[in-house]
Amino acid sequence: MSALYTRVYDLIRQIPPGKVATYGEVGAWAGCGARTVGYALAALRTERVEPPVPWQRVINAQGKCSLGEEQQRLLEGEGVAFGPDGRTDLARFSWDGP
DNA sequence: ATCCTGACCAGTG
DNA sequence: GCACTGGCCAGGA
């Protein structure tokens, strides 16, 4: 596990429940590109890390869940509202940052 | 080093 | 709204 991945995971763990962040934002805070954040999160599918990373709070810049309904359901359980088109209001629910 | 692959982004038509 | 394009960054062959 590279230091960069650890940094990305730490940042995501700081996102409070009921808030979300975009790949681009997380990348800017971590000092890498948006694709790299996606790559780091993809590794979580096969690689478990402790403590757990709330990956469902990271969505794309369009306010949509990249990973389908399961991610959306998890976020709704935390208080993040989604519109009928499956998008969320980034102005209301995006985290301010660390 | 080069090429390919991604849970991406912003711009353009 | 959609599709395409170029750019972005890390990892592996």
Image (cartoon, coloured by chain):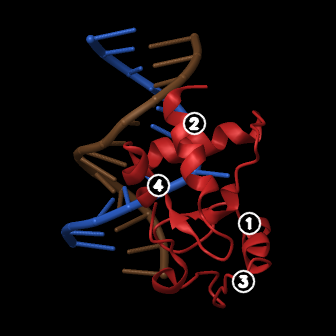
Chain colours: A red, B blue, C brown
**Where is residue C6 shown, x and y percent of the image?**
23, 46
Q: CA distance from mark 4 to mark 1?
A: 18 Å
Amino acid identity at mark 4: Val
Q: Estimate how packed mark 4 is, as few (under 14), some (14 to 19) or many (20 or more) residues with alpha carbons within 10 Å.
A: many
Kindly identify which residue carries mark 2. Answer: A6
Q: Contact (CB < 8 A) between labels 4 and 2?
A: no
Q: Estimate how packed mark 3 is, as few (under 14), some (14 to 19) or many (20 or more) residues with alpha carbons within 10 Å.
A: few
Q: Between disc 4 and disc 1, whose residue precedes?
A: 4
Helix, strand or loop at label 2? It is helix
Q: Between disc 4 and disc 2, whose residue precedes?
A: 2
Chain designation of label 1: A
Kindly identify which residue carries mark 1. Answer: A71
Q: Between disc 3 and disc 2, whose residue precedes?
A: 2
Q: Contact (CB < 8 A) between labels 3 and 2?
A: no
Q: Between disc 1 and disc 2, whose residue precedes?
A: 2
Kindly identify which residue carries mark 4. Answer: A26
Chain designation of label 3: A
Residue C9, picture quadrant: top left
Q: CA distance from mark 3 to mark 2?
A: 27 Å
- Residue A47, above or below A92: above
Amino acid identity at mark 3: Gly
Helix, strand or loop at label 3? It is loop
Q: Which mark is residue A13?
A: none
Q: Does mark 2 fall on the same chain as mark 1?
A: yes
Kindly identify which residue carries mark 3. Answer: A79
Q: Between disc 1 and disc 3, whose residue precedes?
A: 1
- Residue A30, above or below A22: above
